[in-house]
Amino acid sequence: MKYRIVADSSCNLYSFEGVDFSSVPLKIVTDKKEYVDAPGLDVERMIGELAAYKGRSGTACPNMAEWLDAFGQAEGIFAIAITSSLSGSYNACVQAKAEYEQNYPGRKVCCLDSLSAGPELLLIMEKLRELISMGLEFEEIERRIRRYMQHTHLVFLLEKVDNLAKNGRISPLAAKTVGVLGIRIMGKASDEGTLQQLHKCRGEGRGLRAMLKEMELMGYRGGKVRIAHGLNQVASMELERSIKGQFPQADVGIGDFTGLCAFYGEEGCIMLGFEDSEA
């Protein structure tokens, strides 16, 4: 069976080596401009323009037709979407699955609600690539990936939350204190796929230590870690050093935000996906 992995652009990747892959773009929109989260987007410029823009801004999820187009002609498709609690991308994916399987009897689509965003999606994609390379049947891959997703997690550290607050992703009350006296919000993706605030940390160093402590409380013992950031390479590397200092065998990778995560995370944000000890 010819397999393809499809993910919306909340995964922070437009290409993915070693397997047939397609990215479905989300969009960042203002009253004057639309930014398509696809190759060619200058994320740093977008962040600067949005910081200076005083009007309304928000996001738009892919529609069913865009998911269908990304499915291509694959016989077995594994499609991964940003958490359905924050976006309609997953629902559009499910609609595309129904249309695709009706149009092409015998082909199969597995829609995965990540209940997360960013680097946790990358972990899921990497596991899917591994399972596909093993030559497993579609149903066995689906069974194993759904089990694996029960043991991946996301924590984050936010320096700015203006766009999250404006778009109803966190409460305005919580947003008021962020940035004051260096306060940052450290949180996680909940089991329901919502953004759950855990701590308010004064200073980036304390925030990074809180992330590592929370990882351990959630069962991290040295497995895979994938870090993504909004123009904050220095802190990401510091976090990597701390993780490897405590868990020398850890497999840690660092990448940049693309458009969607850059819009909601804003400059300075760090998102970290990891496996617990049962993965």
Image (spheres, grey):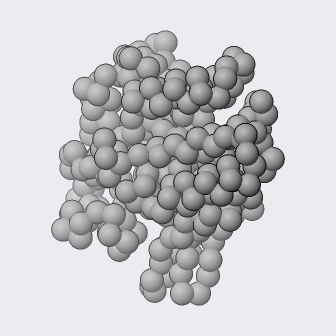
Quadrant containing the N terminus is top right
From the viewer's side, name the closer residue of 102 and 109.
102
On the question of residue 232 being in view, the answer is no
Can you tell which quarter of the image residue 20 is in? top right
Which residue is at 36% across, 40% downward? Answer: 155
* Residue 237 in picture, x, y percent from top left: 50, 34
Answer with left or right where residue 48 lies relative to residue 212.
right
Which residue is at 51% across, 55% downward? Answer: 90
From the viewer's side, name the closer residue of 234 and 42.
42
Quadrant containing the C terminus is top left
Which residue is at 21% across, 63% downward? Answer: 174
* Residue 273 in picture, x, y percent from top left: 45, 36
From the viewer's side, name the closer residue of 248 and 145.
145
Answer with left or right where residue 267 lies relative to residue 219.
right
Q: Residue furthest top?
A: 249
Which residue is at 39% across, 35% downward? Answer: 153
Answer with left or right where residue 187 lies relative to residue 277.
left
Can you tell which quarter of the image residue 150 is in? top left
* Residue 177 in picture, x, y percent from top left: 21, 63
From the viewer's side, name the closer residue of 213 and 89.
89
